[in-house]
Image: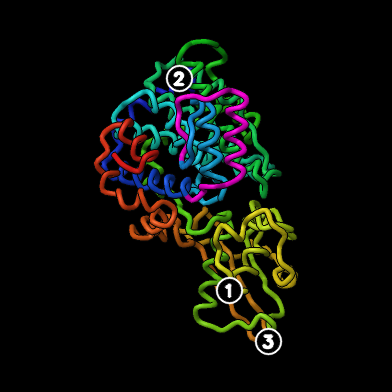
């Protein structure tokens, strides 16, 4: 038996050990996904993508989150994935070094919209998808991301395919075929960060996962059923899928240990350490902007790999810039979606960004609870009179070791979609996927 098929058998065997606590964490992830999607209402790029899909493929019977109209199931996965990531407000898992829910859930929603099963089965499928994402992320090596691949897109595609295949209860051969079809389509480069195409990566991965699973389910095309070796050989630092992927899968579910990282701000999570550091400094000190001499932001090597813009020209690029985000905070501006639109950056922000310098120090001992693993950020603000304000952050607010309180999760939902917040009790009474779709798309059960 191939290692891919061994993995599939492990997935089915260990799924019976998903606990109520794991499902509760899955529910929180689904709620955050709903919040994130409804925060992206009335985005022109979404309207344009919807119209393009209808013009190309016609209307369908699958729903779009937060928008009118219906499209084909495949295009719904594409558009809903795009919506989930367009603000970069969606959850992160540090082991994946990416965004699992924005790909897995749109794929599952398309698979399930006309295939009613229990809500628990949907949640379990989601948990298994997240597990696949994190296990690949842990075993593929940091070079995958650092060499320029967008892990959310490459790893996310396979993870969402696994989630969809589990949802449909595919047999081992069809399941392995679906994974193989997904692997051969894996793509996405970090060079697109700071543009709408980054979110398109997520949508395309969700669409490909849906498509790969359906083609395998209907046995339309058959291919190599042991493609995970090729995935690691092409994208990682090993020629084979590691045995640990099978051994560790589901031993402890990663949606719980360590858990998902939920966002309070619509920008790259690699900024979150410095955000907490500057907020802490400002909470205890008055920092006159005209008295600042330098702002040093200290990372471990490659700790800022996602923050590719040192001199951003637009707010959209600024979402991936330590210089931009730190300058916004010090100028007293709120980190809301308006600050990260594709608009020119104001001159006062440019002037402050010029004082920001990135430094790297690998002699600093990582905190054992640091997230992502071995990561930290130190902000050191030097004033003209020689005064220095300094703060180190290892576990940002929202990350699993510094989690959001339940009311903070619900506050995000309240701001993005009051109708869902008002109907929150119904969410916890959902028993099947028909009711889930009714809640998401109509705000009621």
The one nearer the camera, 79 or 249, is: 79
Q: Residue at x 54, y 61 (%)?
A: 336
Q: Residue at x 44, y 36 (%)?
A: 105
Circle nearer the viewer, 1 or 3: 1
Residue indicated by mark 3:
386
As for residue 62 lying within the magenta part, the answer is yes
Q: Is residue 53 above or below residue 307?
A: above
Sequence-first disc among 2 and 1? 2
The one nearer the camera, 154 or 231, is: 154
Q: Which residue is drawn at 30% across and 45% down?
A: 24
Q: Which residue is drawn at 36% across and 46% down?
A: 256
Residue indicated by mark 1:
332
Residue 151 rendering spot, x and y as whole percentages: 59, 40
Circle 3 residues within 10 Å: few <14, some 14–19, many ≥20: few
Circle nearer the viewer, 2 or 1: 1
Label of residue 199 in the image: none
Q: In this view, does 183 lie above or below 420?
A: above
Local SS, label 2: helix
Circle 1 residues within 10 Å: few <14, some 14–19, many ≥20: few
**In the image, which residues are magenta?**
39-65
Marks 1 and 3 in Cβ contact (< 8 Å): no
Residue 321 rendering spot, x and y as whole percentages: 66, 59
């Amino acid at each position: 038996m191939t290692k891919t098929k061994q993995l599939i058998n492990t997935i089915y065997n260990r799924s019976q050990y998903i606990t109520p606590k794991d499902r509760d964490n899955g529910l929180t992830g689904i709620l955050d996904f709903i919040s994130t999607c409804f925060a992206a209402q009335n985005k022109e790029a979404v309207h344009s993508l919807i119209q393009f899909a209808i013009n190309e493929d016609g209307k369908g019977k699958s729903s779009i989150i937060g928008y009118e109209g219906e499209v084909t199931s495949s295009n719904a996965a594409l558009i809903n994935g795009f919506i989930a990531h367009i603000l970069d407000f969606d959850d992160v898992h540090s082991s994946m070094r990416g965004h699992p829910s924005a790909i897995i859930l749109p794929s599952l929603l398309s698979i399930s919209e006309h295939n009613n099963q229990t809500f628990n089965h949907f949640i379990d499928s989601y948990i298994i998808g997240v597990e696949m994402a994190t296990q690949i992320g842990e075993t593929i090596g940091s070079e995958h991301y650092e060499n320029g691949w967008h892990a959310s897109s490459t790893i996310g595609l396979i993870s969402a395919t696994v989630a969809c295949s589990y949802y449909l209860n595919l047999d081992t051969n069809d399941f392995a075929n679906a994974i193989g079809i997904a692997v051969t389509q894996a793509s996405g480069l970090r060079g697109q960060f700071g543009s709408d195409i980054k979110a398109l990566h997520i949508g395309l991965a969700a669409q490909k996962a849906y498509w790969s699973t359906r083609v395998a389910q209907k046995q339309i095309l058959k291919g190599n059923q042991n493609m995970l070796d090729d995935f690691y050989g092409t994208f990682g630092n090993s020629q084979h899928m590691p045995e640990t992927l099978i051994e560790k899968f589901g031993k402890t579910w990663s949606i719980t240990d360590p858990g998902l990282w939920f966002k309070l701000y619509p920008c790259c999570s690699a900024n979150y350490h410095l955000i907490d550091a500057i907020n802490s400094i400002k909470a205890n000190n008055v920092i006159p902007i005209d008295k600042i001499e330098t702002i040093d932001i200290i990372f471990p090597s490659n700790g800022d790999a996602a923050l590719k813009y040192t001199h951003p020209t637009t707010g959209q690029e600024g979402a991936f810039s330590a210089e931009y985000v730190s300058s916004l905070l010090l100028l007293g501006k709120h980190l809301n979606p308006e600050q990260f639109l594709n608009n020119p950056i104001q001159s006062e922000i440019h002037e402050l960004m010029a004082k920001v310098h990135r430094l790297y120090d690998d002699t600093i001992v990582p905190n054992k609870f640091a997230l992502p693993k071995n990561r930290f950020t130190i902000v050191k603000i030097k004033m003209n009179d020689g005064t220095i304000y300094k703060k180190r952050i290892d576990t940002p607010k929202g990350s699993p070791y510094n989690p959001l309180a339940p009311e903070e999760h619900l506050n995000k939902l309240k701001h993005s979609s009051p109708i869902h917040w008002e109907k929150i009790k119904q969410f916890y009474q959902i028993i099947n996927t028909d009711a889930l779709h009714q809640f998401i798309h109509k705000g009621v059960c």
